[in-house]
Amino acid sequence: MGSGPSLAVDVSMNTILSEADRAKYMDPGKIRAALSSTKTIAIVGLSPKPERPSYFVGTYLQYEGYRIIPVNPRATEILGEKAYPDLLSIPHPVDMVNVFRQPEECVEIAQHAVQIGAKTLWLQLRVVNFEAARIAEEAGLTVIMDRCVKIEHGRYSGSLHWVGMNTEIISARRGQRYF
Amino acid sequence: MTQQKRKFGFETRMLHAGHIPDPVTGARAVPIYQTTSYVFEDTDKAAQLFELKQYGNIYTRINNPTNAVFEERIASLENGTGAVATASGMAAQFAVFMTLLEPGDEIVSSSHLYGGTKTQFTHTFKKLGVKAHFVDPTDMQAWERAITPKTRALYGETIGNPRGSVLDIEPLAALAHAHNVPLIVDSTFATPYLCRPLDWGADIVVHSATKFIGGHGSSIAGVLIDSGRFDFSSFPTIAAPDPAYHDLKFYETFGHYGFLMKARTVTVRDTGAALSPFNAFLLIQGLETLSVRMERHVQNAQAIAAFLAQHPKVAWVAYAGLPDNPYHALAQKYTPKGPGAVFTFGIKSDNARQAGKTFIESLHLFSHLANVGDARSLVIHPASTTHQQLSDAELEEAGIDAGMIRLSIGLETTEDLLWDLDQALQLT
């Protein structure tokens, strides 16, 4: 991930979380670490329809080098990957569980995320469930809430900036080179 | 891993928002990317970009890395979620309305407007099947009466050109939201340093960046900024499937930046009024000193308005910074650091039109031209220039006094400006 090393920034826009919860669930350091260490992302609620937001996110993540695993009981294959009806059916390890479902479904999803040994539970914008967060945190998972994984990837890789968005990142330190 | 968070101040963001020194060169100043286009990494990436599935540079008519620094910086200063830069202020407001409106729609606008805006709303919008209703901005009931089921937006200027009225943004935003339409505010005269309309509930801010943002009279430019808070889910042009992008629903897919993405990738792409990267660089230079310039602009303006108010050759002064001005209370609420540096006054004379001409021609420091918001002081006499074809009676109808002079106060030595105005007034 790029965009300079400074993380002393309070990303405060477009969220319904309190300042205390923002510090907990949308910390820039945690988000960057999660996006850097993750290789496989199970997307719960990924739609097969190309015009849907989840599809935009899936195709973005795939292009950025992540392996995405669709979790959708009504699909067999999405974006060239086999779809599974639920997290427990995925036969291989998953680093991150990314959720496009209603908040009330998230407790069960969090329990499943813990069972399959995921390292991060990421709930999309306005998908907020503190009980789900607690379950995942207690099992040692990193929890991100009320954030879009595509927007955050774009924020810290620098590309969100190219479409005139206010990333809220302030840093005088030089951007990083990867190699 | 968790680190102490800081909310950075306005002046810090003037200098740093939107620009991180790039990893390859480390250039501290913002580089000017004077390029039309960008080499794609491969055909897949090109397709992803064209389908808006990746964020990236395609063509400078749509986006440009220098423009992006200006856009993010002004969005940060206005407390907005993002911005789209345009070739002029007129282009910015046009882009807002072309994104929001369809034929048959209506808008309700303050009548205290820059003349060019009034002309655009009245005549150009008419060609597109859009009707603009104009109301006295101080009359909240007039706003409400003018709203119909076809109304799609309310519009006003933070500080109205040229009479200096201050828009009561907070109740107007509440009225707009009660009717499920956004409030759009032209905040050119205030700049984000003096007033941030989004903080008072406005949804979209537009600027002629030509003025105080650039600050040096060098570049024509505009910008639109979105709060990201307006619910466009039932707003046809932003929520409905867009046939130009495989039935993409901008609001559903991009959420709080759906309006901005549509403005950029549909309206500005199709209408073509993109900002030049070189001009974006000059605007960035302007933003870096915005607060110090605006402090001095309003300090000079306040001193000059007070001086003119007690001058025997002056009939009236319309500056909301003066305690007896009808907008003084609103100015204290919305522009506590000062209500800008553009205002009008009237020369006391039996032949006001001639007195205005004599005054203008006797000035040594004020530049006679059709602009405001330069670092230099500017002057214009509407009755002998922009409105010279009108009779005295017609001028009165248009709300313009034959002796009305508009000043844009610059950064010169205060006493020199007072001297210049005084000696020219004495000759009238």
Image (cartoon, coloured by chain):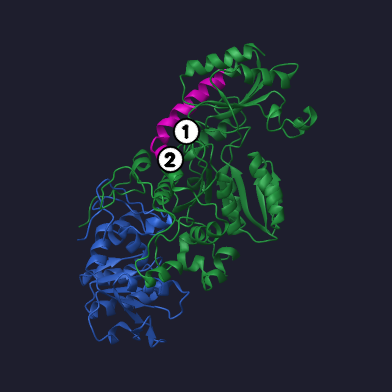
Percent of width and height locating residue A98: 33, 73
The quadrant the N terminus of chain B occupies is bottom left
Q: Nearer the viewer, residue B143 or B157?
A: B157
Query: Residue B89 has which mark?
Result: none
Q: CA distance from mark 2 to mark 1?
A: 9 Å
Can residue B9 be spotted in the picture?
no
- Give the amino acid at mark 1: His
Q: Nearer the viewer, residue B336 or B207?
A: B207
Q: Is residue B198 above or below residue A177?
A: above
Q: Which residue is mark 1?
A: B216
Q: Is residue B130 magenta?
A: no
- Give the amino acid at mark 2: Leu
Looking at the rendered structure, whether the residues under marks 2 and 1 are on a common chain is answered as yes
Q: Which chain is blue?
A: A
Q: Nearer the viewer, residue A102 or B281?
A: B281
Range shown magenta: B283-307
Mark 2 and mark 1 in contact? Answer it, CB < 8 Å. yes
Q: Earlier in the sequence, mark 2 or mark 1?
A: 1
Percent of width and height locating residue B355: 70, 18
Q: SS class of the residue under badge 1? A: loop
Residue A42, quarter of the rendered image: bottom left
Can residue A75 be spotted in the picture?
yes
Q: Relative to residue B256, is residue B369 drawn left or right?
A: right
Image mark 2: chain:
B
Q: Is residue B294 magenta?
A: yes
Q: Residue at x 48, y 19 (%)?
A: B414
Q: Relative to residue B415, is residue B243 drawn left or right?
A: right
Tell me the colour chain B is drawn in: green
Q: Which residue is mark 2?
A: B282
